[in-house]
Image: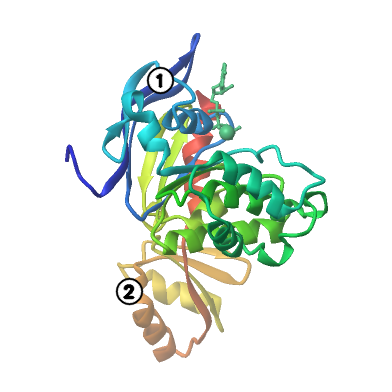
Amino acid sequence: MTTNNDVVVRTEHLTKHYGKLVAVDDLNLEVHRGEVFGFLGPNGSGKSTTMCMMLGLIAPTSGNIEIFGLSVKSNLADILGKVGAVMESPGFYPYLSGWDNLKVFARISRNVTDNRMKDVLKLVDLADRAQDKFSGYSQGMKQRLAIACALLHDPEFIIFDEPTSGLDPAGMKEIRELLIRLGQEGKTIFLNSHLLHEVELVCDHVAIIKKGKMIASGAPNDLIKHGDTLQIRVTDTDKAVALLNEEDWVSSITREGDLLILKAPAKRATDISALLAQNGVFISEMKAREDSLESFFLELTEEETVD
Ligand SMILES: Nc1ncnc2c1ncn2[C@@H]1O[C@H](COP(=O)(O)OP(=O)(O)OP(=O)(O)O)[C@@H](O)[C@H]1O
Ligand SMILES: [Mg+2]
């Protein structure tokens, strides 16, 4: 697995010290082509520092980063030609229109035609508002204009640092939908976020970091523990408990109000309903309980308060 076209970013033993503080600690990441990669961690866990090292803005204390198989240390200009970054909103001019602000950035990037600008504005859903003054834009529109700027040179790989911060739920949704759309277009996306829900909704792969160290990595669905917990509501709770207690595949039963919480393999659902029905107990509700990525994340990061 040394050179592989499928790998867009690889970090090896990436480490950054700020004096005594270890902001990024021996991080080994691999981001694959076409992936929407979520980099999830609580505040101060090293996400922005990692991103800045990828963009060559901060030099690592040790370790390496390769993007498109090239070392960031020695090939930064070539790499940046294919990379877009959405960090904090760039300095837009409030009295210029969205179009004229974009034009300022287009002049900095080479080879950006008016048609490209139009395409990009369409992509971020600002085409209709391009002639309006930036100062009249909502926060979500401002952020979408920032994304338009990052897309001008048609990057293959785009890095987002907390792109929904400061947005209301509707604005967040707009940005999430845009991220999903970019992913569907085959862009490779690296998304820094401390919001689980965001990562869960948008990403194919998640790496969780804590104090600069990667503590878990995988598809969101794999990180969510597919529990063996079933929640049922029945017509006769006491009788159901008595019946289910007889089955050795039921490992525990607890009551939560008028609900029964069973630890049993989810595939036993039909056995449960058959057993109860044969004994005159009927189920009005049955669902599998899944621990969300949130509880997983909290579990992983809670240890932090102990040490
Ligand atoms: N220039 C700097 N000098 C000293 N310490 C720094 C510097 N930049 C970041 N740090 C520290 O490094 C650690 C990681 O910071 P970083 O900004 O990478 O975290 P983050 O995961 O992006 O957090 P957030 O979710 O708050 O954006 C923090 O403890 C931070 O205080
Ligand atoms: Mg940050």
CA distance separating discs 1 and 2: 49 Å
- What residue appears at the point 53 percent right and 36 percent down from the top-left corner? 302
- What residue appears at the point 70 percent right and 37 percent down from the top-left corner? 91
Going from N to C along the chain, the mark reached first, 1 or 2, is 1
* Residue at the extreme top of the image, as rendered: 19
Residue 43, percent across and down?
59, 33
> On the image, which quarter does residue 15 sit in?
top left
Left or right: residue 255 compared with residue 136: left
State whether residue 162 appears in this view. no
Viewer-side label of 1, 2? 1
Q: Is mark 1 on a helix, strand or loop?
A: loop
Q: In this view, does 59 lie above or below 91?
A: above
Disc ID at residue 139: none
Query: Tag count in the figure?
Result: 2
Which scheme is used to colour this image of the protein?
rainbow
Which amino acid lies under the numbered mark 2 shown in the image of this protein? Lys
Left or right: residue 22 compared with residue 3: right
Other-residue count near label 2 (Cα within 10 Å), few / some / many at <14 / 14–19 / ≥20:
few
State whether residue 196 appears in this view. yes
Residue 197, percent across and down?
56, 54
Task: Report the image quarter containing ligand 2.
Answer: top right
Q: Is mark 2 on a helix, strand or loop?
A: helix
Q: Mark 1 points at which residue?
A: 60
In what quadrant of the picture does the N terminus appear? top left
Residue 217, percent across and down?
36, 44
Q: Is residue 82 above or below residue 77?
A: below
Which amino acid lies under the numbered mark 1 shown in the image of this protein? Pro
Q: Mark 2 points at which residue?
A: 267
